[in-house]
Image (cartoon, rainbow, N blue to C red):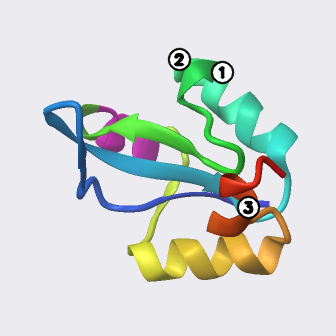
Amino acid sequence: MTILIDDPRWPAHGRLWSHLISDSDLAELHEFAERNDIPRRGFDRDHYDVPAEAHERLVAAGAKPVDGHTLVRALIASGLRVTARERRHGA
């Protein structure tokens, strides 16, 4: 089980954001987030949105830095991915 984080390159609310995922287990992801003071409100169905200033700290805590394509492929392979269609239809 691995926690992955992509580069902070997603703009929103006047800052850049990264995505934090687990490659296998949402419980593992929630535990990692809680241990590292990432608020639950940052969880978006299959990942946490985390601000750029948290990136280095999360890597130091054990999150593996990967590019965005690798992160999405890992999320799909895990079976945890929530598709855009599922998001639109509330699934």
Please identify, in this view, whether the residue under mark 2 or under mark 3 is nearer the observer. Answer: 3
Q: Which residues are magenta?
A: 54-60
Q: Which residue is located at x 47 percent, y 40 percent?
A: 49
Give the alpha-carbon distance from disc 2 to disc 1, as whole Å: 5 Å
Q: Taking 33 as reference, is 67 left or right? A: left
48 versus 68 height, above or below: above
Q: Amino acid at mark 2?
A: Asp
- Residue 28 image point, x, y percent: 80, 42
Check residue 6 in the rendering and tell me which mark sits there, or answer none: none
Would you call the spot at circle 3 few (<14 residues within 10 Å), some (14-19), or many (20 or more)? some
| Circle 2/circle 3 CB separation < 8 Å | no
Residue situated in front as seen by the camera: 64 or 78 = 78
Residues at marks 1 and 3, CA–CA distance in whole angstroms: 21 Å
Q: Residue furthest front?
A: 89
In the image, which is nearer the foreground, mark 1 or mark 3? 3
Query: In the rendered image, which residue does mark 1 sit on?
Result: 34
Tags 2 and 1 in contact by the CB under 8 Å rule? yes
Q: Is residue 84 magenta?
A: no
User: Considering only vertical position in the picture, is 61 above or below 1?
Assistant: above
Q: Which residue is mark 2?
A: 37
Q: Label 3 sits on what residue type?
A: Val
Question: Residue beneath label 3, please?
Answer: 82
Instruction: Residue type at mark 1: give it.
Output: Glu
What residue is drawn where x is 43% and y is 71%? 66
